[in-house]
């Protein structure tokens, strides 16, 4: 793919704006795709994705079957949007796991394209990690997908083994097909995966209908109500996004759990709100705005891979693609009828708002946010047995890691099992850097301490233009081939991935 002149200009523009530092920071690296039709705001109720039910429970595991298929849903009034979803829903059914109880998920593919399913944040064996060329093709699919080194092809369905040997956490699963993750997730292949454990259950936190996962993403619509995406080839044979969209695709409609700018009635009580950024490229600066303009405190209790040692209160939180923030918001002081808007200060116009909460019922609330949540071993620089640097950079219409395009047979590092390494990420644009398997703690950002919402165990970190971010990654659980990549899905599809081998 050759560098288009407009692309160069756009990229230069992004650098100029984003390079000036925090004050001018914005939605990230990408380009807005304007919708031809847009749904109204705050009229749809917030959907809560259904919980998947096991088809079989054996002594060893709970067995689930999910079918990837197309379905038509009404997102724009009076029009149909064709989605690709797990069980034909977007988001897919929520998988709920308990620490130590393995799960086997049979993924059936009834879509017209190959898929690979990755559990983001999961500590899973390599052959169940959803490697980009570990594909499941629909029955009778042709042409055969190009066989790339280390690639596998399953026909019609396959099983993923999830041992769930990890702490309570908010994970999500999504498509990871080589070169096509962006368009396939955009069409709806994403869902929640929530792990709980006894330590979490013992805490007096909000639960059940007051434990709300919010899978947030942006989309754009064509005039007929279909999802618009600037792919070179909507049949998904030729990869890549057109022209300046090589930088990333921003939609101008914000969806929460698949519904555009929904509204949700709440009690005068605390809610646990699990924020998940499932957008291809868009970053959010989130806050809860009360009717008088005041911002309700967001008391963060967890990050990507589980609870924090202690709660941390914020007025706002930045969330990059792939990241999760687990927060508690208290609607207890508000009068009946009060409207609280979840706003996005990185958005402009309609993208500056995400959804609305309406206080509907007065209740007594017996929840609490304890001063101590769960113990977290705090890693220190001296714990690292090795240091490595990964440079994320634009190069001639593609995106590189350490100057290289993704090579499924290659490997940039071989960390040893059960060790901690210091990994240093450097960048030119915004790159949300994500590691498979390994969870990490953010050690520093631009030589300073990380942002206040970046404590605890994470797997995705917001790397901003010309910034260096250091993380301490712990390689535990399994040996084998895993990957790190940029979670801007257009960058990912245009080669910004690399493998590492845990040895
Ligand atoms: Cu959520 Cu490899 O990605
Ligand atoms: Cu992942
Ligand atoms: Cu990137």
Image (spheres, helix red, strand yellow):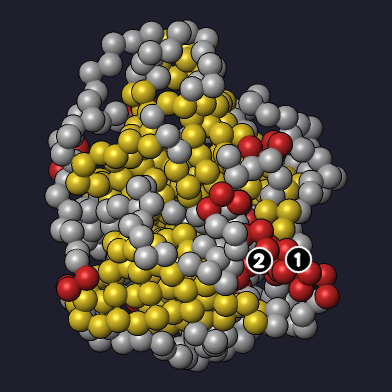
Residue at 47% over, 74% down: 426
Q: Quadrant of residue 105?
A: bottom left
Residue at 76% over, 73% down: 8
Q: Which residue is mark 2?
A: 15
**Quick one: 87 or 497, which is closer to the camera?**
497
Label 2 residue SS: helix
Q: Is residue 382 visible?
A: yes
Label 1 residue SS: helix
Pair 2/1: label in front = 2
> Looking at the picture, does residue 134 appear above or below residue 443?
below
Categorize mark 1 by other alpha carbons within 10 Å: few (<14), some (14-19), many (20+).
some
Cβ of mark 1 under 8 Å from ligand 3: the answer is: no
Image-based side of 93 in relation to 140, left or right: left
Q: How much space separates mark 2 and mark 1, taking CA atoms? A: 9 Å
First in sequence: mark 2 vs mark 1: 1
Residue at 53% over, 53% down: 22
Residue 398 point in image, percent of width and height: 65, 79
Residue 197 point in image, percent of width and height: 20, 46
Q: Which residue is mark 1?
A: 10
């Amino acid at each position: 793919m050759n560098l288009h002149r407009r692309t160069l200009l756009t990229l230069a523009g992004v650098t100029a704006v984003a390079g000036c530092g925090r004050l001018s920071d914005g939605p990230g690296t990408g380009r807005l795709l304007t919708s031809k039709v847009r749904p109204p705001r705050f009229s749809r109720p917030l959907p809560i994705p259904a919980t998947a039910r096991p088809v079989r429970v054996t002594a060893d595991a709970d067995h689930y079957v999910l079918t990837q298929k197309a379905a038509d849903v009404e997102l724009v009034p009076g029009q149909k949007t064709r989605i690709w979803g797990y069980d034909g829903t977007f988001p897919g059914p929520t998988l709920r796991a308990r620490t130590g109880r393995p799960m086997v998920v049979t993924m059936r593919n009834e879509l017209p394209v190959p898929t690979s399913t990755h559990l983001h944040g999961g500590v899973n064996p390599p052959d169940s990690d959803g490697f980009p060329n570990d594909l499941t093709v629909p029955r009778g699919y042709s042409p055969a997908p190009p066989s790339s080194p280390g690639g596998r092809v399953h026909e019609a369905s396959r099983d993923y083994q999830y041992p769930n040997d990890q702490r309570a956490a908010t994970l999500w699963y999504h498509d990871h097909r080589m070169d096509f993750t962006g368009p396939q997730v955009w069409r709806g292949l994403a869902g929640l995966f929530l792990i709980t454990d006894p330590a979490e259950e013992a805490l007096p936190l909000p639960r059940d209908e007051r434990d709300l996962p919010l899978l947030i993403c942006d989309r754009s619509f064509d005039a007929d109500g279909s999802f618009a995406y600037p792919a070179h080839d909507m049949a998904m044979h030729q990869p890549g996004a057109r022209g300046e969209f090589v930088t990333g695709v921003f939609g101008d409609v914000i969806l929460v759990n698949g519904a555009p700018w929904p509204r949700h009635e709440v009690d005068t009580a605390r809610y646990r709100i699990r924020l998940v950024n499932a957008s291809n490229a868009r970053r959010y600066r989130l806050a809860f705005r009360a009717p008088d303009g005041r911002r309700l405190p967001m008391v963060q209790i967890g990050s990507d891979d589980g609870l924090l040692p202690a709660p941390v209160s914020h007025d706002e939180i930045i969330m990059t693609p792939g990241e999760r923030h687990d927060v508690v918001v208290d609607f207890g002081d508000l009068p009946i009828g009060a409207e609280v808007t979840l706003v996005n200060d990185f958005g402009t116009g309609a993208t500056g708002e995400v959804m609305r909460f309406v206080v509907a019922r007065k209740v007594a609330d017996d929840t609490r946010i304890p001063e101590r949540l769960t113990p977290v071993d705090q890693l220190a620089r001296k714990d690292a047995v090795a240091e490595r640097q990964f440079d994320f950079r634009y190069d001639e219409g593609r995106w590189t890691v350490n100057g290289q395009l993704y090579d499924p047979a290659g490997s940039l590092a071989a960390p040893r099992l059960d060790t901690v390494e210091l990994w240093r990420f450097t960048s030119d644009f915004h790159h949300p850097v994500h590691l498979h398997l390994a969870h990490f703690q953010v050690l520093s950002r631009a030589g300073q301490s990380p942002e206040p919402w970046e404590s605890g165990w994470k797997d995705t970190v917001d790397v901003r233009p010309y910034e260096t971010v250091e993380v301490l990654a712990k390689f535990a659980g399994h040996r084998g081939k895993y990957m790190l990549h940029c979670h801007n899905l257009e960058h990912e599809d245009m080669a910004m991935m690399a493998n590492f081998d845990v040895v």
